[in-house]
Amino acid sequence: MDNYFNSIYQSNSGYVDDMFARYNANPNSVGTEWQAFFSGFQQGFASASTLSQNSQHYEQLLTQLANTPKTSTTVETNLDTNTVDFEMRVARFVCAWKKNGHLVAKTNPLSEETLQTPELEYEFYNFTQEEFKWKTKAGILAKFPEMTLTELIQKLKERFGGNVGIEIEHVECAVEKNWLYSELEKIYAPVSKETQKQIYSELAQADALEKTLATKYVGKKRFSIEGADAQIPACQSFITESVNLGAEECTVAIAHRGRLNFLVHVVGKPLEKLLAEWEGYHHDGLVGDCDVKYHYGYESEQQTRNGKPVRVSLPFNPSHLEFVGSVVLGDTRARQQLYYGGDTNKVACMVFHGDAAVAGQGIVYENAQTMTLEGYKIGGSVHVVANNQVGFTTNPSDARSSTYCTDVAKVTNSPVFHVNADNLDALHNVMTLCARYRAQFKKDIYIDLICFRRHGHNEADEPNFTQPGLYKLVKEKPAPYETYMQYLVAQCGFSEDELKEIYNKYRQDMNIVFDKVKAEKRKIEQFQQPRDAGKLTAASQQQMLERADTTFPLNKLKELAIKVSSLPTDFHANSKLARIIIGERAEMAQGNKKIDWGMAELLAYATLLDEGFSIRLSGEDCQRGTFSHRHVTLIDAEDDHKFTSLSTINPNCKVEVINSFLSEEAVMGFEYGFAVRNINCLTLWEAQFGDFANGAQVIIDQFIISGETKWAQQQALVLLLPHGLEGMGAEHSSARLERYLQLCAQGNMQVCYFTTGAQLYHALRRQLRRNFRKPLVVMTPKSFLRSPRASCTLEDLATGTFLEILDDERLEKKNLVEKVLLCSGKIALDLFDALEKDEYKTLDSKVAIIRVEQLFPFHHDKMSDILAQYKNAKIFWVQEEPKNMGAWFFIQDEMQTVLQKNKIKELLYIGRSKRATPAVGLEKLHHIEQDRLIKSALESNKSVEV
C-alpha cells in the first residue's frame, strides 16, 4: 500500500488532493475505487506520513483536510469514522496553533496577559477524555513525531506559546517554511555558559554607559537604550553567526534611541571620543556645523564573541527615524560590489526600528520592496524592532491599525518572531537563526523585540503624564542586566558576586575615562571618512568654481561613440528605434550629425567608464528616459532580452541602469547611501518629472544637502530633474528650482540648468574628475532634448570644458546692445528662437541673451566680466516660472555685488507674477502667457509680470 500510494501521489498530487477533499466532504461523491482507496484511512495516514518526508504536497493535503467542513453522510461500515474525525480535529488544532499561537505567547516583559483565543483551547475541538490518550500523527504539520494528544498539546504550547511568538504561516515558499519549522526546536535550546556570560556583559556595559552619562550630564538628552538593552546582545549574536557563515562586514542602521550605546559597544567608537563630544570642546580644526551626538555614525574593525575579525559600520542619521534604512541598504550594496564582487554573504545588514516608526512611516514599506529587486537587493536584511510599547506619548492602539507593528513583513513573505526581551537565551537563538536564514534564502526577516522604555521620549520628559498605568509597571521593572543576572544565578549556576563585579568594573572604568577626558579637556575629533574617501579633500565654494579638466582624446571619443551606437549582430531592435536612435547615433559618431542631448549624456558615461569609473543610474523610466531620449538599454523585439551598450566599454567597471520601482524616497535614499560609499561611481537618480522629487524631501534636506557640513561626508549624487513650463499643468512643470536654491550655502552642492548637451557632458565628467565630491542638482529639459540649439559637436566634448555662464556668441558689437537678458535653461532657447522670427528680427543686434548655466555656486567674477562688455544696456532677469518661484529671489541677491562692481543701477524682472502653483492648468492659456512673456522680454524697457 505504501509504494502504491507513494507513486500515485507523487505523479498526480493535485488530482489526489482534490479527490481526497471531495471524499472527506462526501464519500459518495467519488467513485467506488476511490472510496475503497481512501476507506482505510488509518493505513493511508501512516503511509502518507512516510511520504511526507519527501513530498511537500502532504502537508498541504492535511491542511486542506483540517479546514474542510465535515458533513454528515452515510459511510461504509469498514471506515473508522472515530479515527477520521479525531485526526481531522487534531489537524485543525495544530493548524490553529501554527497560525495564531503567537497571540498567546508570553512575549510582554511587563505583563502576563495574552489575548483570549478560543481556537487555541482544546475544549474548542470537543476532545474526549479517552482521546487525550490516543496517539496522533497530525503533529507532523508542525514537524512533531507521532505522540499522544496530551503530549502534543504540551508541545504546541511550548513551541508556539512560549517567550517567542512565531509568524511564519504567511511564508509562501514551502522550502523556506519547512526549513523554518525544522529550526524552531532550536529556539529554546540551552545556551552555553560562555555565551550567557558574554550576553550578560553586553547588557551590563549598556546599562553602565547610560548610568554614567545620566550621572555626569544630569538632565541632558541622550535617548537612552534603557529597557531595550537587549538590542545590543541581539546585534552581537547576529554578527557572530553571520561571520561564522562567511561575512566580513556588517552594516547597522538605528535611529537616535540607543544610538550612543551602539556607537560604543557595537561599532567600537572609543568612549573617550564620545565623552569629548559631551564635553563639547570645540576648536578651529573642526569642519562644518557638526551635529548632535546621537546622530553620528562610526566604523571600525571589531571582533565577534568568538574572536573573529569583522568590520562594523553605523551610518550617520538625523532624527527622521526610518529614513536611514534606505541609506544603509544603498551603503551595503555598494560595499558588496566594491569590495567583494557582489557577494551578498560578505556584508550582512541589520536595521533597527522603533515600534511606532516601523508601523507609521511609509518608507519602511518602500524599503521592504527592495528585497528581491535586481537593482537593489543585498541578500536580505534583518530587522529588529525595539518595541517599547509607546511612541513618544502615543499608545499602540493610536499608532497603528494592524495587529503588530511588524505586519509590513507579510508584504514580502518575511518571517516574524515576537520575542520577550527578558528571555535573552531565546533571543540569542532567534538571532543566530536569522543569520542562517538570511545566508540561505537571501531574504528579510523581522524580530519584534518586546521591551520597554525606562524614561520618557527623552530624559527630560515625564511619561507619567501620558502613560501612568504603563509607567507604574516600568517603575517596578529591574534593569535588563539585573533581570538576566537573577536568571543566571537562579537557573544557570552563576555567582551573583561575580556578575555584580563585572558590572561594577564597567562603571569604574567609565568613570576613569570620564575623569581623564575632563582633566585633559580632550577636543572633539573630526568625523570619520569612508575608508576610500581619504584621497578626497574638502573644497570651498571658491574652489568649486575652479576649472576641472574634462577633456578627452577625440579619436578615442569617436571610438566610444561608435561603441554606444552599435548592437550585437543577433539583437533584434525595434525597427523605429533602429532607425531613429541607432541610425542617428551612428551618424553622430561619424561626425555627420551634431550630438544631441541623449548622445552627449551617454558619451559622458562612456568616457568615465573608459577612465575606470563605474556608473549607476536609477529612476522610474531611466533605461528609456521618460521622454524617450536616452534608450541606454534596448529591449529585443523578439524575446524581450535587454542590451545596454555601455556595458561593452570597460569589463572591469560596473554599469547599472535600473528602472526603479515606483518610489522616490527609498530609492533616492538608497542612491545617497551608495554614493557616499562608492566615491568612484557616478551615481544618478532621475525623476520621471521634476516634482516627483518632492516625495523624497527628507532625503534631500537631511542627507544630500547637509550631510557634508553635519558629518563631513562627501558624495557626488546627481539628481536629474525634468523642469520647464510647457503647458502640462502645475504638477509636471516645475522641479521646484527655488527650493534647491534656498538650500544652497557653504558650497554644499551645485545647482544647474543647462542649455546644451556639451554642458551636461562636462558637468557629469566634472563630478568624478575633481579631488572632491559635491552633489549636483540638474534641471533637465523636456521639449528641447532634441532641439538643434541644444546640440554640440564631438570637438565640443573632446576639447571643451564646463562654463558656468555662457555669453551671447551671436553679437560682435556689444556696445550697441540695449538690453541684456540674463536667464537660465529653456527660456533662453525660447528667446533665441523668437529672435529669428520676422517680428523680432530688428532686435537681433540690440538684445543679448546671457545664460546662467550654473546657478550655485554663482560665478560673480565671470558675470562681472561679461556684463562689463555691455556698458550701454539695461540688465534684466528673465524666467518663465512665477516670481515667487524659479531663480529670481536667489539671483537678485547674488547679483548685488556684480551690479555694484559694474556700477549698474538695477536688475529688472520679466516673468510670471507670483502664483500659488508653478503653472496654469490650461494649455492654451499657457501659450498665451508664454507669448506675452517672450514679447515683454524682447520689447519692454521695464520690469513686467505676466
Image (cartoon, rainbow, N blue to C red):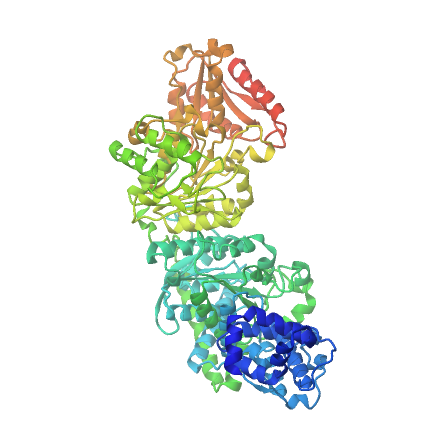
Considering the image in quadrants, where does the C terminus appear? top right
Does residue 673 appear to the left or right of 158 in the view shown? left
Q: Position of residue 932 (x, y in %)?
A: 58, 18
Q: Is residue 920 above or below residue 374?
A: above
**404, 398: nearer the viewer:** 404
Q: Is residue 376 above or below residue 137?
A: above
- Residue 539 visible from this viewpoint: yes
Q: Position of residue 181 (x, y in %)?
A: 52, 74
Does residue 131 appear to the left or right of 617 in the view shown? right
Q: Say how many tags the image has.
A: 0
Q: Quadrant of residue 365?
A: bottom right
Q: Is residue 649 above or below residue 255?
A: above
**333, 838: nearer the viewer:** 838
Q: Is residue 786 above or below residue 630?
A: above
Residue drawn at the location 56% of the way across and 22% of the way down = 930
Q: Position of residue 464 (x, y in %)?
A: 67, 65
**705, 746: nearer the viewer:** 705
Q: Quadrant of residue 866?
A: top left
- Residue 479 visible from this viewpoint: no
Q: Quadrant of residue 397?
A: bottom right
Does residue 901 appear to the left or right of 911 in the view shown? left
Does residue 100 appear to the left or right of 637 in the view shown? right
Q: Position of residue 549 (x, y in %)?
A: 29, 35
